[in-house]
Amino acid sequence: MRRVYLDHNASTPVHPEVVAAMLPYFSEHYGNPSSIHGYGRDARDAVDAARGGIAAFLGVAQEELVFTSGGTESDNLAIKGVAHASGAGHVITSQVEHHAVLRTCQALERAGYAVTYVPVDGDGLVDPDAVRRAIRPDTILISIMYANSEVGTIMPIGEIGRIAAEHGIPFHVDGVQAFGKIPFSVRAQGISLLSCSSHKIYGPKGVGGLYIRKGTKMVSIQHGGEHERRRRAGTENVPSIMGFATAVSLRARDMPGEAVRVGALRDRLWDGLRAKVSEARLNGHPTRRLPATLNISFRGVEAESLILALDLKGIATSAGSACTSGSLEPSYVLTAMGVPAEWALGALRCSLGRSTADEDIDYVLEVLSAAVQRIRAVSPAAVA
Amino acid sequence: MYSEILLDHFRTPRNVGMMRDADAVGESEDPSCGDLARFFLRVMDGKVAEARFQTYGCGPSIAASSLVTELVQGRAVDALAALTPDVIERALGGLPEERRHAATLVADALQAAGARYRERHPGEVSRV
């Protein structure tokens, strides 16, 4: 049976060149980068080179990049690190952030901070003016994601960055879904902190980074040794950092061509589905969207049954919503976008990647349109 | 995650669709998740001669509905209450904790159809 992986926004296969770059750092160059001896110096040189490579990709200074255990830790460090440096105040974020940001902000609320969750429009966009209007004299941080993981909508980061700069407020961007997928400039867009992750871009899991612009006032949230310029205690995960840096260098090389190729496949999938299946809708911005993300709904089709039908045919996709403990809730992202529940419950996310081939799209078109028809046939809405 | 029995019923659901001249129709909706199951029964001599279903919901809800249309075949309407959520779950080869609502939904819809039949045929006793 053909197998097609269309869940690259969840995780990606590690690139073979990345695996090769990691291997020597398990049992050959295994020293602790903090050690003084030759083994330690080898590891330190490797981590420095990795940091230099990723910093160059982002167009930032080496010492502005901190390695973490991944996107979630980067978001926690950015938000709590800035908040705790003030001790009190107001944070602005959006209703459609990843849980790593939303739940960190909720934790701040419980600790006495104030948080404003700005809404989004029907395409999933944050209105920069809404951010401007939310600013208070005690606002200490603005945190808005670069691109949404469920629907792929790309936020007006440059405009929000200008507003943050005008008011002298640090601006954190959760860049996990955009980093290495679309080109952007950290400096030109006024970003003070940027979270990024390795396993979304064909690197290993368990490693990520946080760019911290020089001069950003923040405190460490994990205490211990003096690693990462005292911003993140803990021995550096050297093999994974090497893998992360290699993954980034491959993105620098492959990203422009791949964005065009995968974007065309994604559009062909949507055009084909629209032609074959009635009552289908696209969720997310029609054009300001990550090139590989397609979030779609079919009226009268519940997402879990569709995902199962596709899985039985070797196709891996995901739903914005997850049925847990007997209660299926429409995705909070789609709800914030005003998508009616009858559509939101059937939302299916297909996220393509470097391995997605032309024939995969043909296969998915055939299987998906048949699955929708079959599920509709057993539905009470079906006309016998 | 799901048993082969469940997957088989999901892949090739039996007795799908509405029945125009059913002797009883019963349905149940899970308000928390929007799943809905509906059964149509044709009854002869107090026993289920034919059952069909329409279900909107997750894979297990669809599979459980299909399975139940087979389980009720030839069964006395008065004995449908024996098909409890536990019995349906066991017949499906088990359900993950977070999908057990599927068996409850389907059992409720079936009981509703049985109750509807008895309302319309008071005093009828099934000949076993």
Image (cartoon, coloured by chain):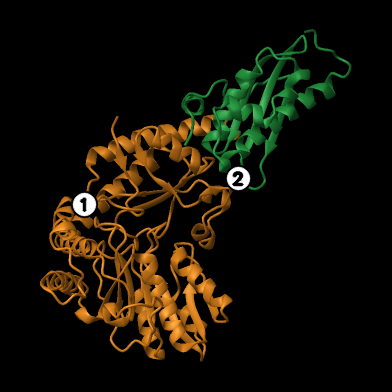
Residue at (66%, 42%) from the top-left corner? B30
Residues A238 and A370: in front is A238
In this rendering, the answer to whether B123 lies above or below A188 is above
> Number of callouts in the render?
2
Residue at (20%, 74%) from the top-left corner? A55
| Residue A119 in view | yes
Residue A82 in the image, given as x and y percentages of width and height: 42, 83
Left or right placement of residue B65 versus residue A309 in this view:
right
Q: In the rendered picture, chain B carries what hue?
A: green
Q: Quadrant of residue B29?
A: top right
Q: Secondary structure at mark 1?
A: helix
Question: Residue A28 shows which numbered tag?
Answer: none
Q: Which residue is mark 2?
A: A326
Q: Which residue is mark 1?
A: A261
| Residue A156 in view | no
In this rendering, the answer to whether A32 lies above or below A198 is below
Residue B114 in the image, given as x and y percentages of width and height: 76, 24
| Screen quadrant of the C terminus of chain B | top right
Residue A195 in the image, given as x and y percentages of width and height: 33, 71
Left or right placement of residue B71 versus residue A139 in this view:
right
